[in-house]
Image (spheres, rainbow, N blue to C red):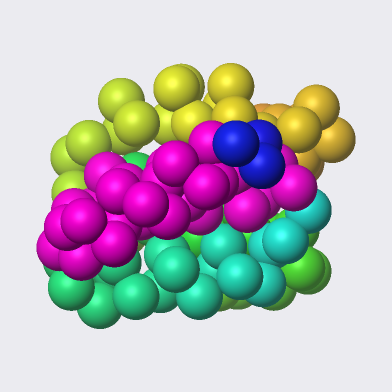
Amino acid sequence: APGVFQLACLLVELDTADEASRILCADALYQMGRGEEAHRLLSLALSRNPHRAPVLARLALLQLKNGFVYDGNQLLQRVIRTGDTSCLLPIMDIFTDEDRKLMQTHCHFQALAILESQQED
């Protein structure tokens, strides 16, 4: 992760508008346990393109990890509204086992809650 972070930082310096390099940099920061810095980078990327599903999904995990369930839900709903949920599967490979389980459990319970509310209606 430190080598990937250094490479991604160099790529960002070469092209400050390159969103993929910023995401790679944020992923490396996350892997190194520097979640706050990853959050700042992702928030900056989101301010430039507020409908970018891979950024939203990463931010959702960081919010859930920090105990901000409501914010995490809002971000996941935005991912769903973009129609690009295909980004979730590759992102799961980046998450630690603990965080992957957190995201899977959270999404599972949210899906059950949605199904139950639809059945009641």
Q: Is residue 31 magenta?
A: yes
x, y percent for residue 57: 44, 49
Please tell me whether residue 20 is drawn above or below residue 3 in the rendered image: below
Please tell me whether residue 112 is drawn above or below residue 8 in the rendered image: above
Which quadrant holds residue 27?
Answer: top right
Q: Quadrant of the N terminus?
A: top right
Q: Is residue 69 visible?
A: no
Q: Which residues are magenta?
A: 4-32
x, y percent for residue 117: 52, 50
Residue at (80%, 27%) from the top-left corner? 97
Q: Is residue 68 visible?
A: yes
Q: How many marks?
A: 0
Closer-to-camera residue (24/101): 24
Residue at (25%, 77%) from the top-left corner? 47
Which quadrant holds residue 39?
Answer: bottom right
Q: Is residue 68 magenta?
A: no
